[in-house]
Image (cartoon, helix red, strand yellow):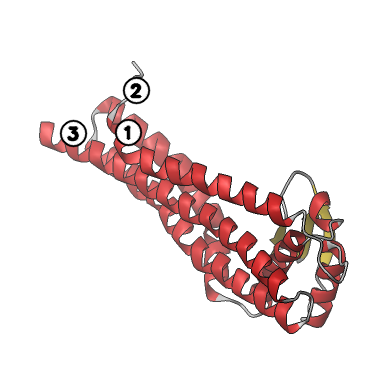
Amino acid sequence: MFYFDPMYLIFALPALILAFFAQYKVQSTYAKYSRVRNTRGLTGLDAARWLLGSSGLSHVSVEGARGRLSDHYDPRKKVLRLSGEVAYSQSVAALGIVAHEVGHALQDQTNYAFLRLRTGLVPVVNLGSYLGFILFFIGILLQFSGLIWLGIIFFSGSVVFAFLTLPVEWDASRRALQMLRAGGLVDSSELKGAQAVLSAASLTYVAALAQAISSLLYYIFIALGMRRRD
């Protein structure tokens, strides 16, 4: 029998509230600065090409990305992918987003340790999260604490991954603002707008970490409860 455990809310609710707030902050901040045109009239695509060229990253190609705010840098293929609304927008928000992704390309070029570590953990974490839930669920059904704790160990990789994501994203934003300022692509007010967009986006990664931690703590709570009953 499947049932809803009210105790789950105690662990999950704060993280869910933070996630909803982060999403609201991203959407509202992006909506605000996507309506502010940068004084140089640069599109996101213009800025991407200029920043890549000036940073010694001419080998990085630029492609389109499907979806809204789906912009990202692919370190395996050395490709910067931009969504249509960012690539062809002349907004301050677009400049901030593009510069952030170029920041990831710079991290890749300079072998930034946290990026390397996070990228290397991707396949391990994907498999671990999947196996962790299965092992935990089977352990609950069989009342086998060994499987439960093994599932928790596998699942804890997602917490490590979410934790490593924070310095990667913060450093990319730091590099982004430095590039925009040094290249004269924005004035002081536009720089503040780009910073606001990037700061709002960083909240989503904090929320993701909080959700991973809350889920892990809930699983541990269940495991400890079973041990007490034994």
Q: From where the camera sits, is residue 58 visible?
A: no
Q: Classify mark 3: helix, strand or loop.
A: helix
Quadrant for the C terminus in the image: top left
> Which corner quadrant of the image does residue 4 belong to?
top left
Q: Amino acid at mark 1?
A: Tyr
Q: Position of residue 67 (x, y in %)?
A: 75, 43
Circle 1 is placed at which residue position? 8
Residue closer to the observer: 46 or 79: 46
Q: Do residues under tags 2 and 1 come within 8 Å of each other at their CB atoms?
A: yes
Q: Amino acid at mark 3?
A: Met
Q: Is residue 178 above or below residue 42?
A: below
Badge 1 crowding class, 10 Å Cα cut-off, few under 14, some 14 to 19, many 20 or more, is some
Instruction: Tell me: 8 left or right of 127.
Output: left
Q: From where the camera sits, is residue 153 visible?
A: yes
Instruction: Tell me: 15 left or right of 200.
Output: left
Disc marking residue 4? 2
Picture residue at 32% right of the left edge, 40% below the top: 11
Farthest residue toward the top?
1
